[in-house]
Amino acid sequence: MIIDCHTHAWDYWPYEPQVPNPESHGTVEKLLWEMDQNGVDKAVIVCARLEHNQHNNDYIAQSVKKYPERLIQFADVDCSWTATYHAPGAADRLAEAAEKYQLKGYTQYLTDDYEWFESEEGLKFFEKTAELGLIVSLAFGAPWHAHVRKLAKRFPETIFIGHHMAGTRASERAPHPNFAEVLKSAEVSNIYLKMSGFAYVSQVDWEYPYSDTHWMVRKLYEHYGPERLCWASDYPPVLWSMTYKQSLEAFRTHCTFIPDKDKELILGRNMQRLLGV
């Protein structure tokens, strides 16, 4: 089974410059077509209530009801572009979203308010996360790693999974202090990484198959092990750099240093276990 653990879908394209067909460019049906063409069984849709899409959680919830065997929703709960980002009442909003959308996980895109994790509101939020057994899908870079490690140790039963190799960048100069933070987080057993965003990690976003990232991917594999890495496409934003097929083959075909049995874990079995599907 192949599970794409990080995709998006919108009924109106949220980014500028605007595309010629904003009503269809990012729809769930286009995602499903790409999955069908490439043998991908299921996808986690990471909601993002960006411009034109304040209702994205509802759109994805309706889509999950329409395609329950193919899609899993991770709702946008107080992401950095929302008016409620790290505002009082976060735990109650999380509980409401979890019940309304029957969530297995949720996402937060962060800014630089690192102290929030240890605030009274932040701790209530993650206590509710642990109580509900939710997966935390986080967009965070190197400056957040120390804070995420501390939080993950405090809530050892909660899975924290970082988007797009969590701040890994091939452009960073030796001795790679930011990458060292990413590797250090592997010491905490409930921190996982999404093996996605090869174009973000690479120094040249169109230089498929992104060979300059491979030494870093190898290090992530060696530190986190095959059980805590999960493949993802980041469709449809990935189309700025490569096709859906290439987002799969950049890992499956070109990361030759990872054995096939471990690729099976990373391509789907790990997420299957985490999601209980």
Image (spheres, rainbow, N blue to C red):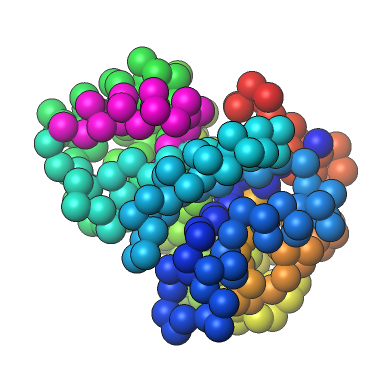
Q: Main secondary structure of the magenta part?
A: helix
> Which quadrant would the C terminus be assigned to in this image?
top right
Which of the two residues, 60 or 91, is positioned nearer the viewer here? 60
Residue positioned most to the top? 131
Residue 41, position as x, y percentages in the image: 77, 41
Foreground of the two, 184 or 11: 11
Residue 155 at least partly seen: no
Residue at the image point whose x is 69% and y is 29% from the top: 272
Q: Against 260, is 14 above or below? A: below
Say which residue appears at 64% left-offset and 22% top-offset. Answer: 276
Residue 94: where, in percent of width, then height? 31, 30
Q: Which residues are magenta?
A: 89-107
The image quarter in which residue 273 lies:
top right
Q: Is residue 145 left or right of residue 42?
A: left
Towards the viewer: 175 or 248? 248
Residue at 85%, 37% (x, y): give it: 261
In percent of width and height, residue 46 lies at 50, 47
Residue ID at (42%, 44%): 57
Question: Is residue 100 magenta-colored?
Answer: yes
Tell me residue 89's x, y (percent).
16, 32
Q: Is residue 58 magenta?
A: no
Whether 160 is drawn above or below 255: the answer is: above
Image-based side of 261 in relation to 153, left or right:
right
Q: Is residue 74 visible?
A: yes
Image quadrant in which the N terminus is located = top right
